[in-house]
Image (tube, helix red, strand yellow):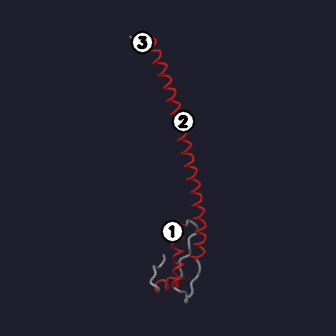
């Protein structure tokens, strides 16, 4: 026959439980701290990438605006083809939609006439 182990006295059990509970709380605090630090690092990296991408987009738009402005102010001639008129009109629309730079001069009467002649929307 084997004897069953005697139960520990109540004070010892309470002290052991308290020690285990303190150790578990300390581990939980460390885990929460580590998770907060990891989340902060990840969100910082995301913000950095967002700012970097935004700067890239701004540079791209700025270079596109310069291109559209140069094309939008090209004068058309009476013998301009429909493709040439479309290019100028599309550049004007793109510049007006994307760019905050200097305003374009109003379209000339010949550009309006050719746009109507080719059935293209007349610019403002």
Q: Secondary structure at mark 1?
A: helix
Q: In percent of the image, x 54 and y 45: which residue is there? A: 43
| Sooner in the amino-acid sequence: mark 3 or mark 1 | 3
Query: Vertical placement of 94 versus 37: above or below?
Result: below
Q: Quadrant of the N terminus?
A: top left
Crowding near pointer 2: few (<14 within 10 Å), some, many (20+)? Answer: few
Q: Secondary structure at mark 3?
A: loop
Residue at image mark 1: 97
Residue at image mark 2: 34
Could you say which quadrant of the image residue 80 lies in? bottom right
Calculate the distance from the C-alpha at mark 3 to the C-alpha at mark 2.
41 Å
Could you say which quadrant of the image residue 76 lies in? bottom right
Judge depth for marks 2 and 1 and give the one in front. Answer: 2
Residue 8 image offset from top left, x and y in percent: 43, 11
Residue 102 image offset from top left, x and y in percent: 58, 69
Q: Secondary structure at mark 2?
A: helix
Residues marked 2 and 1 touching at CB (< 8 Å): no
Residues marked 3 and 1 touching at CB (< 8 Å): no
């Amino acid at each position: 026959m084997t004897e069953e182990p005697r139960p520990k006295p109540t004070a010892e059990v309470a002290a052991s439980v308290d020690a285990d509970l303190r150790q578990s709380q300390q581990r939980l605090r460390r885990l929460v701290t580590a998770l907060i630090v990891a989340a902060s690092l990840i969100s910082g990296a995301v913000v950095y990438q967002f700012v970097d991408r935004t700067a890239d987009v701004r540079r791209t738009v700025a270079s596109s605006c310069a291109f559209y402005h140069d094309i939008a102010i090209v004068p058309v001639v009476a013998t301009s083809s429909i493709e040439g008129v479309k290019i100028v009109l599309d550049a004007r629309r793109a510049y007006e939609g994307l760019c905050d730079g200097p305003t374009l001069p109003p379209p000339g009467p010949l550009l309006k006439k050719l746009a109507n002649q080719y059935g293209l929307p007349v610019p403002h």
